[in-house]
Amino acid sequence: MNRTDDLKNLCQLFYQDTNIPFYLYQNTELLSAFPDTQPACVYPPARYRDALFENAETISYLFTDYGILYASVHPSTPPGLWILAGPVNHIPFTDSDFHHMYADYIVVQEDRAFFQGFFQFIPPVSLTSFLTKMLLVNYYVNQEKLELSDILKNNSGKISAQHVEKTYEQKETFTHNNSYEVESLILHYIETGNMDGLKNMTFTDAVIQAGVVAPTQLRQIKNTHIAITTLATRSAIKSGVDTDTAFQISDLYIRTAEQTNDPAALNALSFQMLLDFAGKVQERFLPGTSDELLLRALRFVQQNTNSPITVRDVAEYVGFSRSYFSTYFKEQMGFSLSAYILRCKLEESKQLLQFTDKPLSVISNYLCFSSQSHFQTAFKKQYGITPLQYRKNPSLHGKGLLPEER
């Protein structure tokens, strides 16, 4: 039996034991999927596959923005052959999860019933349990015994090992006298989606002083993590991040911290949490307004880009007539509600063009454009380039502002 067949059998056995989907890749080419009856619409999205493939660690994992988990194991031989597992969730997949997954996987309406049934068959799995399974896979394929703490240390997102070491060594450099200023600056960076500002800071467990001194240093670090996560969650929601999404991210990071007993890994986890919240704000930043009525409408549009929503639908959602709310929106925001609906659909299309290989016909259908031609014309008018030009070179586009905002 050759190595590839050996790994295929391993993936099949793990799937049969756990009901967690397993995939065997040669570089980014899928060789085998388990269960072997699954259609392509449930394969891991390309952006998660590529992120795990490019990670140099033997065992890697990542969370999506809405909290589901994938992991990978890279055999030492032969080159380019690797295993991907997931997705899993700590609770059964919810309607909110599926709302996000339809966008991530580009699932058209007629495939959604099967798609939902496939993932509801996957049992809930905690982070610790899932990573322990990856440790076992790695032990079989690489004859290497790793600990859970090794994975957590090696997968601290975009935080380099050098930065983690520096952070831990300098954990006493912030004093009580400047902790409030530092805290305010961090929260400002989150509210404005300023990831670069956060990356230029040194985050420590002394940035925010927990209200109650814990009996141990480890417990104190965990308390601090919970405190800053709570504040970061509020800041993200304040800046327009969907409430359910923000609390899912918050719960995920707090649960992970409670399962982590290494101070350096906890500091790295806290920093990654801040970056994730800032990234969500940066990605979904709302036009500036403090009007709660308008914020509800803006969020509703953002959450329904893959539905054929109209100005009337939005007006009914916030409890007003179409004519009144359309006029009110234009007066307050400076651009029309119909233009904002189109803008949100086009902004999502940029993500789909950049991070998936789905054809234009699928993307236009998913975002409920009347035709592919309509989608291409609207995209060209908004950004000055065609969708295919953008896919080939995303750096060509500008800010994607509405004409009234330019």
Image (cartoon, grey):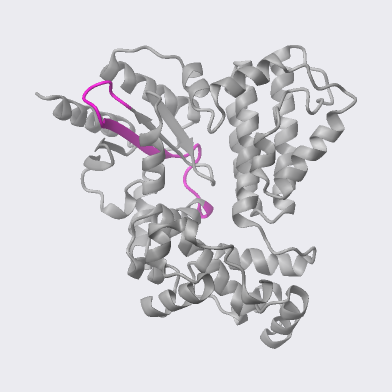
Which residue lies at the image location 43% right of the left edge and 59% below the top edge?
A: 352
Q: Is residue 17 left or right of residue 222?
A: left
Specify the quadrant of the image occupied by residue 253.
top right
Is residue 170 visible to the viewer in this orientation of the structure? Answer: yes
Q: Is residue 122 left or right of residue 98?
A: left
State the extent of the magenta-drawn residues as a range.
74-96
Q: Which residue ends up furthest to the front in the rendered image?
A: 396
Q: Is residue 78 magenta?
A: yes
Which residue lies at the image location 62% right of the left edge and 66% below the top edge?
A: 300
Specify the quadrant of the image occupied by residue 195.
top right
The answer to whether 53 is drawn above or below residue 306 in the figure is above
Q: Which residue ends up furthest to the bottom in the rendered image?
A: 323
Percent x, y for residue 107?
38, 60
Q: Is residue 75 magenta?
A: yes
The answer to whether 40 is drawn above or below residue 209 in the figure is below
Q: Quadrant of the N terminus?
A: top left
In depth, the one of 133 and 17 nearer the eye is: 133
Which residue lies at the image location 48% right of the left edge and 41% below the top edge?
A: 68
Percent x, y for residue 273?
63, 36
Q: Is residue 41 left or right of residue 375?
A: left
